[in-house]
Image (tube, coloured by chain):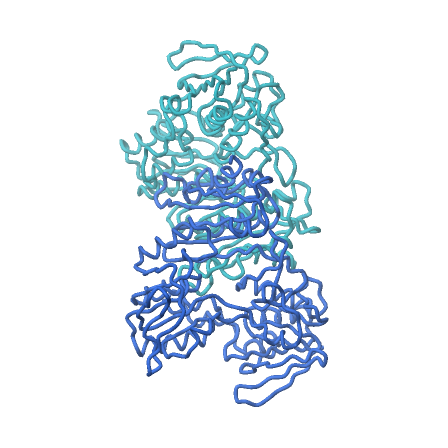
Chain colours: A blue, B cyan
């Protein structure tokens, strides 16, 4: 029995490791296109800014280590270029250009995602970057060390865009962020997005809204001099494109696997695709949204790790389930912690819910304690039932794990009335007697 | 219609305020025995230590203010001494000794709790204290300012005992804590209690375990010179008794209201007592434990506030429910945040569950991030079903709101398998890709 995994990061290696723990005797081969495996991709902005205490800690495993410790063979520099599903075989090309073919009994697709870069912003330039892989970070660091650019322009006030804005500011660069939407972090309800905008301003990040980038002005030396739109142009010394990611599904598509409405690979609760013996997990896979019941695609490391385990167990005959997601995500932006779960009001309405939102502000600790700060929560409920559809929050401390409480409520189909009765921890140094979670639920009940 | 509330703190004033919001036209009278109302009792240790930013913020309302803003009459210095339930009347005595009688249509008992002091430790001494009311704190502060005692002995490594140990250390006193049990915080599972003991040691609090106090050695001048037990004696300059609290139920008892197995006043989901028109809420009331389904008594400000609202609404004809509690509680001890919910292993077994505990340690942030610290979680599950029965945790940050996630799981009857699938927020600055909550659930699944 041979398990073949395409992709050697979060989902792929979680799958391989779980398959090994479940079945000691199967052969497991992981093929990775790049030169790095098993690194904490979400840590890259913090590696740049110096917030990572130990650079080596970002890489969990080397191929030699994972073979030694888990008996999993990982081949880097192995680019799979075609799936031959009928023949149970994959074809590919090594970095040196030599072809390879590998048979399998079970196939796990963990091909991940890659930065979304519109064609107009694609022409190569030596000072234009994306940041998705360790290799991307290496290229950026070499550039920063050699060129010492005083100014960087980030295209996209996405999670990554803003995390990188902080990293660049920490390094002392002047930072401008161009965003097409009228607010940063377009997935957040606007009261929360405003708090993010304030935090950027406080930290001297120049945020320019409603500034879609339509072209790069690249000089004869292959250097981008400005980001251009119909609004004018923004001069720059370096550019980071942070317009989100899209799933790597070309292999699946060429093998005639149907893609889902999100553009990713549809999976069932066992993370099986429509083809027997073929699983998909991580950023290339579509899953179900537990609030809407519809297909969704929320590429995140936490989901990739969970899905990898499920796909790995099932590839060796297990029957584990991935329940789906509620779209929980968060970031820290300088001194502002932000998180969201479920649906925003706009998303709820687009999904056909009759919904309402309440926005409250309450202290993170007892209001009279030193160090207390405000947490703002926007809570989205179904109007008739007061079912929790989503929550968005921001504040200096204690935000994300409070949003997690709403993530549970949304996943379990609980109402604001249920939440209002919750027996949550209380002590003046970490919560007021009415926790912000309860305040939001109570206000939603009363409206 | 006249609503009479006995007790003018968290539960009583929440009840009065909710009754007012629900019914603008009823008369509401609150009788409070002491001179203070509406203050944050849990903030008293922090007022002593200087952690309270604004002393005035500890008092939410004065009687004049609550009359002006909410139309609620509050009379302080009014000690209710007897309930005449058949006559719908209460009798009492003012501070100046004059008697009073007040009729009512609906009665809300919010008589609270008071420090548990065994008779052997009761003889009055000028340097022996309890800390339950604002008045207690005033007396302690006057003593500290006048006598400047270098050493204090705290009897009881309870939540309050340890919060006060921190406060006294902050003020520069030498602190010894005597505890009868073999661990501090006897309600916590022992791995967590050990972390508390370590934190006390790190902060030069002298913790002496298995040292039950059986007497006070009081000299002819009425000064306690030592706390005495069969283990010897501990010299002291001041003593704080922190042996927990018990419900103030004498009024109810004398009026032939049946007391529950916990010693507090039984209530139904509407917080009605067995006598029509008589409600009980807060620290004097018994409620249901949502894990065991049995009566429980967990006196906490958060519960008192919630119960007050329910009792207040129902006293004026509403039909609100208090769902019960899962025994969630927490404290911050120097740099250690601790919280618990549900049942400890011992409590689970005593309640007839076949239960098991797993203890895990996982980082509060991505392990590679500066500032990451360890969170330890003991998770108690029912052996056969893996239903979450309780969780205890400690760490430097992000502990209590993670325990709240288990509080929800315990209240909802969810299993470790359910929890393992939760879509929790993840970003390197505030959570690892496998949140400690998920790690604990996964370990519980595998055992």
Residue found at the far left of this picture: B146
Q: How many marks?
A: 0
> Residue A362 location in percent, x, y?
42, 41
Kindly identify the residue that appears in the image at 48 percent across and 26 percent down: B21
Up-down relation of residue B168 to residue A80 (above or below): above
Q: Nearer the viewer, residue A195 or B5?
A: A195
Specify the quadrant that holds the N terminus of chain A: bottom right
> Residue A237 location in percent, x, y?
31, 73
Residue found at the far front of this picture: A230
Along the horizontal axis of the image, is A221 left or right of B93?
left
> Residue B260 location in percent, x, y?
62, 27
Up-down relation of residue B333 to residue B215 (above or below): below
> Residue B155 location in percent, x, y?
44, 36
Q: Nearer the viewer, residue B163 or B292?
A: B292
Kindly identify the residue that appears in the image at 53 percent across and 63 percent down: A300
Q: Nearer the viewer, residue A218 or A175?
A: A218
Q: Nearer the viewer, residue B32 or B190?
A: B32
Up-down relation of residue A185 to residue A416 (above or below): below
Whether residue A345 is visible, yes or no, is yes
Kindly identify the residue that appears in the image at 51 percent across and 51 percent down: A346
Whether residue B194 is visible, yes or no, is no
């Amino acid at each position: 029995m041979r398990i073949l995994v395409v992709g050697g990061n979060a989902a792929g290696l979680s799958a391989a490791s779980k398959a090994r723990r479940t079945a000691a005797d199967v052969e497991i081969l992981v093929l990775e296109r790049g030169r790095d495996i098993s690194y904490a991709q979400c840590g890259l902005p913090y590696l740049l800014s110096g917030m990572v205490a130990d650079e080596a800690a970002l890489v969990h495993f080397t191929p030699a280590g994972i073979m030694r410790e888990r008996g999993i063979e990982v081949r880097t520099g192995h680019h799979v270029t075609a799936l031959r599903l009928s023949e149970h075989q994959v074809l590919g090309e090594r970095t040196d250009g030599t072809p390879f073919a590998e048979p399998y009994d079970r196939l796990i697709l963990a091909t991940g995602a890659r930065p979304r870069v519109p064609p107009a912003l694609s022409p190569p330039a030596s000072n234009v970057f994306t940041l998705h892989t360790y290799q991307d970070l290496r290229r950026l660091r070499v550039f920063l060390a050699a060129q010492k650019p005083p100014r960087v322009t980030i295209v996209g006030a996405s999670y990554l865009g803003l995390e990188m804005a902080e990293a660049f500011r920490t390094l002392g660069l002047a930072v401008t962020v161009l965003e097409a939407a009228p607010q940063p972090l377009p997935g957040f309800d606007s009261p929360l997005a405003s708090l993010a905008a304030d935090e950027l301003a406080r930290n001297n990040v120049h945020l320019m809204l409603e500034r879609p980038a339509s072209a790069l002005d690249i000089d004869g030396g292959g250097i981008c001099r400005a980001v251009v739109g119909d609004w004018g142009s923004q001069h720059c010394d370096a550019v980071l494109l942070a317009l989100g990611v899209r799933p790597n599904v070309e292999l699946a598509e060429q093998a005639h696997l149907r893609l889902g409405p999100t553009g990713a690979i549809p999976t069932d609760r066992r993370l099986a695709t429509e083809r027997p013996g073929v699983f998909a997990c991580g950023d290339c896979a579509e899953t179900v949204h537990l609030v809407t019941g519809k297909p969704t695609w929320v590429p995140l490391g936490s989901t990739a790790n969970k899905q990898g385990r499920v796909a790995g167990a099932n590839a060796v005959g297990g029957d584990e389930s991935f329940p789906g997601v509620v779209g929980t995500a968060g970031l820290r932006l300088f001194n502002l912690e932000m998180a969201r779960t479920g649906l925003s009001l706009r998303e709820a309405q687009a999904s056909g819910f009759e919904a309402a939102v309440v926005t409250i502000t309450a202290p993170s600790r007892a209001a009279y304690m030193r160090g207390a700060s405000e947490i703002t929560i926007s809570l989205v409920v179904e109007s008739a039932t007061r079912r929790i559809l989503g929550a968005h929050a921001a504040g200096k401390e204690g935000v994300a794990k409070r949003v997690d409480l709403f993530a549970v409520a949304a996943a379990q189909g609980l109402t604001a009335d249920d939440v209002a009765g919750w027996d949550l921890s209380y002590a003046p140094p970490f919560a007021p007697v009415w926790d912000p979670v309860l305040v939001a639920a109570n206000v939603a009940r009363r409206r």
